[in-house]
Image (cartoon, rainbow, N blue to C red):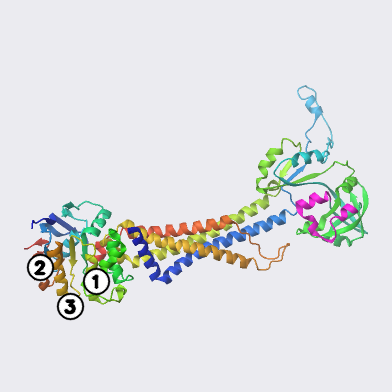
Amino acid sequence: MSKTTNIQIAKVHLTSKIWQTFVAVLGVTFGVSMYIFMNSFMNGVNNAQDDLAFSALSHIRIYNLDNKNDYNPIESHYKDSKTLVTILNRKNIQYTTGLNNSSAIVSSVMKQPEVVAIARQVNANVFFRGGSKQVNGIISGVELKSEDELFNTAETVIQGEWNNLLTYKTGIILGKLLAEKLGLQINNSVNVLTSDGVSKNYIIVGIFESNLKTMDETKAYLNITAARQLVGKNSDFASDIMVNIKDRDNTASFIQKIASMIPYQIESWQEANEQLVAGSELRNIIAVAVSLTILLVAGFGIYNIMTMTINEKIREIAILKALGFSGNDIMTIFLTQATVIGLLGALVGAIMGYGISLLINMIPFTIAGMETLPIFFRAQDFLLAIVFGILTTLIAGYLPSRKASKIDPVIIIRG
Amino acid sequence: MEKTISIEINNLIKYFYEPEKFQVLKGLSFTVQKGEFLSIVGKSGSGKSTLLYVLSTMDTDYEGTLKINGDVLTGKTQNQLAAFRNEHIGFVFQFHYLLPEFTALQNVMLPALKLGKLSIEEIEHKAYESLRLLDLKGQELKNAKRLSGGQQQRVAIARALINSPSVIMGDEPTGNLDTKNSRAVQDIFKQLAQEHGQTIICVTHDPDFANNTDRIIEMQDGLILS
């Protein structure tokens, strides 16, 4: 019964100065809602950034680095003898380029349960020529269906059709800016010249526009069989194999798993794009720092209000103690108030954070394929915000409550 | 009726340390019988209020021993003393210290709610009864801060009585009352002492009040004169 009495006293305190309670609740609300908004916004930005990056980047890339330039049979043969060996103008012989047995690799990688999509590519640096104009760029021979699974390339084709590459053996799809540079339009023909001196004409069956300007300026797609023909390779050749897995943050363990099966270089997107990882990590740190600061400031606000309340009620606390209320009772009374303020503030804050985020999500932002400012909600942010909000309030309420519980009734009553 | 000892103090010494060390109570010893109505008088600065605060168990910074109802209270923790006060001591302050945001009824009920020995209905009934006895009928549900000084003082007295404590202590309990109400309070105290055997100790300046009690302790410079 004593417990309920304490809670009733707390209730009277909270309701008799409703404005003060309101301001305290508002402090928590502000902290919690800003925490949720900041994190949802940062998540949205990170996701947008990733979507942008992964429109041309797979989670894992398998390729042949061909860096065996330390092979030197003559020197190693005479290494321990007293023969003087001099080799002038030594050159590396190219043993292999690309992956000549790509279907074997594809089928063994496909067996892994983590794999979501896998696509082979034949990439080559070429010159594009349209009339007198000559532009250097990259030709990418792709498996149409799996390429689209990985990168949603079909969506980026703004004129013509992605699948035109299937039907037209000599079809090519050019980046929009590349086509403009060459002064070419759809259904025109374009000449492609490889580094080996092979020259071939293709019909432009499509134009694509991605979110990456460099791609639009330099890239063209061919069917993979046409590309193999162009570079003069066998029908199982691929220069790169692109793999997407379920959890892109978990590439390291996947690579470790498949490394023994594949005698080629396996590279994760993190290794290939450290700046991406760094950018997203830094944004996360900023988000956490800002939101913690907000919660801290809100905590100080609550601390102030609680201290003020307790100073105001110092005489009442003394009376309660004289009447036989113990220090623990006094603590319960004020901690109950802090808890109510914390709970109320956190819940209202969560709702408000959600609302603010939705509003921000409506602000137009039309750069790089985005339409509005990005927002992404995660349940854990809401949970953390609420837990932090309540915790901050409790800590901010605990210190003044402890002080209140130690008040000596005589000193105050004597006057 | 066999006389039992309600309060016993032995060689009570107390110092004030601010602004400089000063002996307020200089080795007091006396006993108070159960059901005795006692008043403590003396000039201001004689140490009578200080003595009362020590007796009330709120002030623990003293030398000597304090016994109430046979329990040695010297050396107990603050929380133990708070629980003891709640059950055994009713206190009426020099100023009418009520909780301003609570109604008169709630103020009176609080010590009983804290004690938790009766149901809320019983406590409420008892509080109404007590307030009626003190001529406060109709004021029960008003906020304490809306009552007049005299009314507040009587609410404070009702609050002190709610747990039927064995000892009631007052620091100028009638200081804010007119003659009529002052008399009424004195009569209630007298009745409580005689009929319920409750011990009553009041510090007072009012000679009429003092003369109306069973025994007067007069203090001067930290010593008992008579």
State the mark number for residue B178.
3
Quadrant (top left/top right/bottom left/bottom right) for the C terminus of chain A = bottom left
Q: Which residues are magenta?
A: A140-167
Q: Chain of mark 1?
A: B
Residue B106: x and y, percent? Answer: 31, 68
- Single out the mark in the foreground, 3 or 1: 1
Amino acid at dot 3: Asp
| Disc on res. A350 | none
Q: Position of residue A288 (x, y in %)?
A: 56, 56
Q: Are marks 3 and 1 in contact (CB under 8 Å)?
A: no
Residue A9: quadrant of the picture: bottom left
Q: Element under label 1?
A: helix
> Residue A151 colored magenta?
yes
Q: Are marks 1 and 2 on the same chain?
A: yes
Q: Quadrant for the N terminus of chain A, please.
A: bottom left
* Label 3, label 1: how far apart the Cα atoms are: 18 Å
**Sequence-earlier tag: 3 or 1:** 1
Q: Secondary structure at mark 2?
A: loop
Badge 2 crowding class, 10 Å Cα cut-off, few under 14, some 14 to 19, many 20 or more, is some
Q: Is residue B140 above or below residue B33?
A: below
Q: Nearer the viewer, residue A404 or A326?
A: A326
Q: Quadrant of residue B33?
A: bottom left
Q: Residue at point 12% right, 55% down?
A: B5
Q: Chain of mark 3?
A: B
**Residue A41's x, y, as percent?**
61, 61
Which residue is denoted by mark 1 in the rendering?
Answer: B131
In the rendered structure, find residue B213 and report the number of the disc placed on it: 2
